[in-house]
Amino acid sequence: MWLSLEEASKELKVEKRRIRELLKNEKLEGHFTGAVGWIIDKESVDSYKINKNIGGRPKKPKRPYHRKHQPEQTIDTTSPSDSHQPRLQEKEETKEKERGI
């Protein structure tokens, strides 16, 4: 069975330009006809699809923790005034000492 250039690009999920490169480098089998254009052998497309991840540059490892997969953070229910209360009291005390009260 034969595929057109467009069908082969959809099958492999690559651009037509990449299909032409694969044909030029003899990674895919196909013929150029004047009336139709490129016709590509379906079996070569299928075998390339199986073996296409062999060789080339290795993929980057995925980050271990993505924002979506981080555990939920606990929400601090204390009000800001409650959490800063000791500091405010210390500041007030130091101000009173400076004034001499």
Image (cartoon, rainbow, N blue to C red):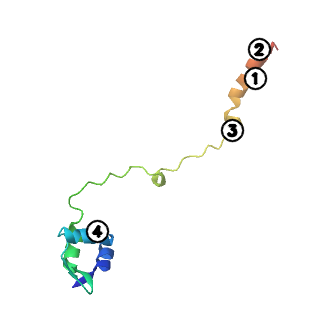
Mark 4 vs mark 3, CA separation in Å: 59 Å
Q: Residues within 10 Å of mark 3 (few under 14, many from 20)?
A: few
Q: Residue 80 carries which label?
A: 3
Looking at the image, do the residues carrying marks 2 and 4 touch, with CB atoms under 8 Å apart?
A: no
The dot on residue 18 is: 4
Quarter of the rendering occupied by the C terminus: top right
Q: Dot 1, crowdedness within 10 Å: few (<14), some or many (≥20)?
A: few
The secondary element bearing badge 3 is classed as: helix
Q: Residue at x 31, y 79 (%)?
A: 7
**Element marked by disc 1:** helix
Secondary element under disc 4, as helix, strand or loop, is helix
Q: Counting residues from the N terminus, which is met first, the one under dot 1 or under dot 2?
A: 1
The residue tagged 1 is: 92
> What amino acid type should be assigned to the residue bearing mark 1?
Glu
Q: Is residue 58 left or right of residue 82?
A: left
Q: How far apart are marks 3 and 2 (CA)?
A: 27 Å
For marks 4 and 3, the one nearer the N-term is 4
Q: Residue at x 68, y 32 (%)?
A: 84
Q: Is mark 2 on a helix, strand or loop?
A: helix
Location of residue 98 in the rendering, given as x and y in whole percent from the top left corner: 77, 14
| Disc sitting over residue 98 in the figure | 2
Q: How far apart are marks 1 and 3 (CA)?
A: 17 Å
Task: Indicate which disc, 1 or 3, sits on the residue closer to the N terminus.
Answer: 3
* Residue 24 found in image quarter: bottom left
- Cα separation, mark 2 vs mark 4, equals 78 Å
